[in-house]
Image (tube, grey):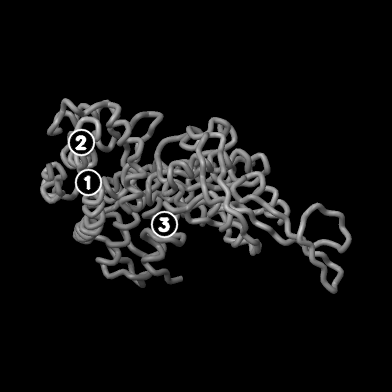
């Protein structure tokens, strides 16, 4: 059988042919789907979260909602209903208040038509009969309340999973609201599968402690060297190629990212002239890998340099209290990223370490306070979303107080780029002062 190289190796929205099952991940995910708990799948970008869904769920088994920075809880619930073919009439706008104290505006009352036998006793209004003897009744539901949404879905005999893709793009207050709603949905046996780019456990439990023991988390990392060799070996068989000369180096250069492994393998094959299953065995040489690495470094570089420039592009305003310009933390963070020891970046940077290192390079070290840095770190994901950095490349673990890179291709780029040259081209907002 003949396979296209781009179907065997690479990163794409469909399931790649070289996908391998890992017991610690795939078995845990399958068990989670049947546990009755809400399911949280998390990890760095391009580490196999979407592939896990595609591998174990058929399209008819779930409805999917793509989250964005503009998405609200009501938007999510309305999307679910539309995908189920539920028609409803929107009426007055409401404001929902959650247990957390957060308020989310733009709720909607929805009047949903149901059909029953004529003469059935009901308290709902707007009944309308037809010649078949059925009565159409509009029942009002508040789509800002998880209880109402649960009742509506059960009334429609909903028996699928709800997949929330790109949960990390949602505003912080919407994530918090959903953490409370998930507790209600779990009580009603409605299972959401949440996909998010972060690397620490219990992200949603931090929003709502009641979710403890009511969610099952499935981290897609780490990937082992044996996993990567299995991916390469499966692709070798499908394309009739031989990676024996370069497979160990591909694994070493991947920095634990299956996305990088997949892309390097794809580019190696294309450099060797293999765009589909070869009739004869083709050897992938170190020269092919060098070309592939250069191509990927350049490709990743365009995106990451643009992300760095967007990240530091903030207006240096004067503080209303001190009258001094702001401390330009985004710039100093990128500067630290491009000058710090690579091994420390891989392990993650603690809040204390960041405070110390930023003070060492800051133009006003005496004004760098832990509280200000903490505010910057707590808002770092939202800052990236606001700057349209997709996917975000860094995340702050509030529980462990550690800053971690979550774009798996960034390690590869930082290792192969001229960090000093890039830093020289990053605009320094301090120059505006």
Is label 3 in a helix, a strand or a loop?
helix
Work out whether residue 256 or residue 409 is closer to the camera in this orientation and state it. Answer: 409
Q: Nearer the viewer, mark 2 or mark 3?
A: 2
Is label 2 in a helix, a strand or a loop?
loop
Q: Earlier in the sequence, mark 2 or mark 1?
A: 1
Residue at the disc numbered 1: 315
Q: Residue at x 20, y 60 (%)?
A: 291
Q: Residue at x 45, y 35 (%)?
A: 201
Determine the residue located farthest toward the right in the rendered image.
119
In the rendered image, is residue 289 in sight?
A: no
Work out whether residue 258 or residue 84 is closer to the camera in this orientation and state it. Answer: 84
Is residue 362 toward the left or the right of residue 198 in the image?
left
Structural distance between the alpha carbons of marks 2 and 3: 51 Å
Q: Residue at x 17, y 41 (%)?
A: 335
Check whether the beta carbons of the residues at disc 3 and disc 1 lie within 8 A of each other.
no
Image quarter for residue 34?
top right
Residue at the disc numbered 3: 234
Residue 121 lies, with reference to residue 355, above or below; the image says below
In the rendered image, is residue 196 in sight?
A: yes
Is label 1 in a helix, a strand or a loop?
loop
Q: Nearer the viewer, mark 3 or mark 1?
A: 1
Is residue 53 toward the left or the right of residue 198 in the image?
right
Q: Earlier in the sequence, mark 2 or mark 3?
A: 3
The disc at residue 327 is 2
């Amino acid at each position: 059988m003949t396979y296209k190289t781009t179907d065997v190796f690479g990163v794409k929205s469909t399931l790649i042919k070289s996908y391998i099952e890992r017991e610690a991940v795939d078995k845990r995910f399958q068990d989670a789907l049947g546990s009755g708990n809400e399911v949280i799948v998390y990890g760095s970008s391009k580490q196999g979260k979407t592939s896990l869904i595609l591998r174990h769920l058929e399209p008819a088994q779930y409805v999917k909602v793509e989250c964005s920075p503009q998405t609200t809880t009501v938007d999510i619930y309305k999307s679910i209903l539309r995908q189920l073919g539920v028609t409803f009439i929107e009426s007055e706008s409401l404001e929902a208040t959650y247990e957390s104290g957060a308020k989310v505006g733009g709720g909607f009352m929805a009047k949903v038509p149901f059909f029953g036998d004529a003469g059935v006793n009901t308290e709902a209004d707007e009944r309308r009969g037809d010649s078949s003897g059925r009565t159409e009744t509009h029942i009002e539901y508040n789509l800002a309340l998880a209880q109402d949404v649960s009742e509506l879905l059960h009334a429609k005999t909903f028996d699928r999973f709800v997949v929330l893709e790109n949960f990390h793009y949602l505003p912080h207050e919407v994530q918090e609201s959903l953490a409370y709603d998930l507790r209600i949905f779990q009580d009603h046996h409605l299972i959401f599968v949440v996909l998010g780019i972060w690397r620490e456990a219990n992200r949603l439990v931090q929003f709502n402690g009641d979710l403890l023991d009511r969610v099952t988390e499935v981290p897609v990392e780490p990937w082992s060297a044996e996993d990567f060799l299995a991916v390469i070996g499966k692709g070798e068989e499908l394309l009739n190629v031989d990676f024996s000369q370069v497979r160990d180096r591909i694994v070493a250069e991947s920095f634990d990212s299956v996305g990088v492994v997949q892309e390097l393998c794809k580019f190696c094959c294309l450099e060797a002239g293999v765009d589909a299953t070869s009739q004869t065995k083709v050897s992938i040489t170190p020269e092919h890998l060098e070309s592939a690495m250069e191509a990927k470094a350049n490709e990743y570089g365009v995106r990451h340099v643009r992300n760095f420039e967007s990240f530091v592009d903030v207006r240096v305003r004067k503080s209303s209290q001190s009258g001094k310009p702001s401390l330009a933390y985004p710039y100093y963070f990128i500067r630290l990223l491009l000058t710090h020891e690579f091994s420390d970046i891989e392990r993650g940077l603690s809040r204390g370490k960041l405070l110390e290192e930023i003070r060492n390079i800051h133009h006003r070290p005496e004004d760098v306070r832990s509280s200000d840095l903490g505010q910057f770190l707590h808002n770092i994901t939202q800052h990236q979303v606001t700057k349209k950095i997709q996917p975000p490349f860094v995340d702050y673990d509030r529980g462990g107080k550690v800053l971690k890179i979550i774009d798996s291709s960034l390690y590869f780029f930082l290792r192969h780029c001229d960090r000093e040259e890039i830093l020289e081209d990053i605009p320094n907002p301090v120059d505006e002062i």
